[in-house]
Amino acid sequence: MSEVAGRMSVQVGAYCLQKANGGPRILLGGVPGVAAAKVVILGGGVSGTHAAEMAVGLRADVTVVDRSMKRLRELSSIFGATLRTEYSTQEHIDALVIDAGPGDRRRADRRAAAPKLVTRDMVRA
């Protein structure tokens, strides 16, 4: 079940970040010109590893925090440069979680609307 929980956590997080679901309009993997979302995973055990696998697969900016240096080394070996690892301290967690918040991304709500190339009448026809 831990594998499922880890994988589902990223799917649920991505769903909640969508504007249609009340989220701040963040795409985990970003797009050219827009940075990828920052994902912080607390714990590098079975659930955390599976969450990291999903988040890295979606091209998010992923950091795993754990108290075991051995496990952090293993994760670095498994994921290479696609994943950052941090030793778990309250200060590290506080800084990472604050940094992963939506911050200035909310400015996207103030952008001008894209031009409407297909009108409602065209769709009705």
Image (cartoon, rainbow, N blue to C red):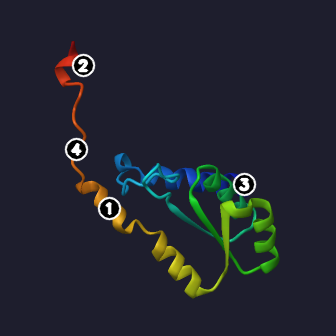
Q: Earlier in the sequence, mark 4 or mark 2?
A: 4
Element at label 3: helix
- The percent position of residue 30, horizontal first and vertical second, equals 48, 52
Residue 112 placement (x, y as % from top left): 21, 48
Residues packed near mark 3 inside 10 Å, few (<14), some (14 to 19) or many (20 plus): some
Per the image, the residue denoted by label 3 is: 3
Circle nearer the viewer, 1 or 4: 4
Can you identify the residue that label 1 sits on? 106
**Whole-Å distance between the Cαs marked 1 and 3?**
32 Å
- Residues at discs 4 and 3 in contact (Cβ within 8 Å): no
Q: For this rendering, which residue is in front, 59 or 65?
A: 59
Residue 5 image-quadrant placement: bottom right
- Which mark is first along the chain, 3 or 1? 3
- Helix, strand or loop at label 2? It is helix
Q: SS for tag 1?
A: helix
Residue 62 is drawn in which quadrant?
bottom right
In terms of image quadrants, where is residue 56?
Answer: bottom right
Q: CA distance from mark 1 to mark 4?
A: 15 Å
Q: Position of residue 52 (x, y in %)?
A: 66, 59
Q: Are marks 1 and 2 in contact (CB under 8 Å)?
A: no
Which type of secondary structure does the marked residue at label 4 adopt?
Answer: loop
Determine crowd level at label 4: few under 14, some 14-19, many 20+ residues with C-alpha closer than 10 A. few
Q: Amino acid at mark 4?
A: Ala
Which residue lies under the disc numbered 4?
113
How far apart, in angstroms, are the residues tagged by discs 4 and 2?
A: 19 Å
Q: Nearer the viewer, mark 2 or mark 3?
A: 2
